[in-house]
Image: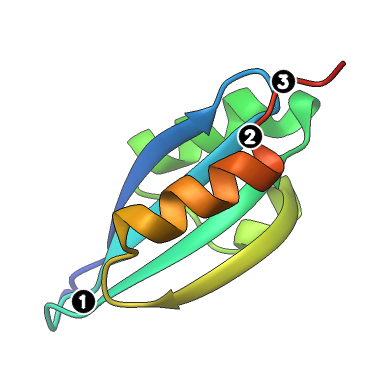
């Protein structure tokens, strides 16, 4: 019996700081999201893993800032982008 895999998506919140919102849709329809500051050497590896639907441990790509169930609100995206998404000086 084949097991249906999770589906992943990626939203760039700050390209300058490699700050991303990564989400997944589970086979049962539930969603989860993760905010992560991606380590620059791992950025292309993460994007490739998401494109291949082959993400196993989000934290191996950088610093996990937060996560939750469902869809994150636009207010949360904006708030975290203000904190972590500002260009570095």
Q: Residue at x 38, y 41 (%)?
A: 10
Residue 1 position, x and y percent, is 14, 82
Q: Mark 2 Cα within 10 Å, few/some/many (few <14, many 20+)? A: many
Instruction: Mark 1 and mark 3 in contact? Answer it, CB < 8 Å.
Output: no
- Counting from the top left corner in percent of width and height, residue 51 is at 35, 34
Q: CA distance from mark 1 to mark 2?
A: 37 Å
Q: Which residue is mark 2?
A: 85
Q: Is residue 18 left or right of residue 29?
A: right
Q: Is residue 52 visible?
A: no
Quickly name the residue at label 3: 87
Residue 53 in view here: yes
Q: Residues within 10 Å of mark 3 (few under 14, many from 20)?
A: few
* Residue 27 higher or lower than 79, as above or below: below
Separation of marks 1 and 3 at Cα, in angstroms: 41 Å
User: Residue at image x 34%, y 48%?
Assistant: 53
Residue 5 left/right relative to 17:
left
SS for tag 2?
loop
The residue that disc 1 covers is: 3
Coordinates of residue 11 in the picture (x, y in percent) = 38, 38
Q: Is residue 86 above or below residue 62?
A: above
Element at badge 3? loop
Density class for disc 1 (Cα within 10 Å; few <14, some 14-19, many ≥20) is few
């Amino acid at each position: 019996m084949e097991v249906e895999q999770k589906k992943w998506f990626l939203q760039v919140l700050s390209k300058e700081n490699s700050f991303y919102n990564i989400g997944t849709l589970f086979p049962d329809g539930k969603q989860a999201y993760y905010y992560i500051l991606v380590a620059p050497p791992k950025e292309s590896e993460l994007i490739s893993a998401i494109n291949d639907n082959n993400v196993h441990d989000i934290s191996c790509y950088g610093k996990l800032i937060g996560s939750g169930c469902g869809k994150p609100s636009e207010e949360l995206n904006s708030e975290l982008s203000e904190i972590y998404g500002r260009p570095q000086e």
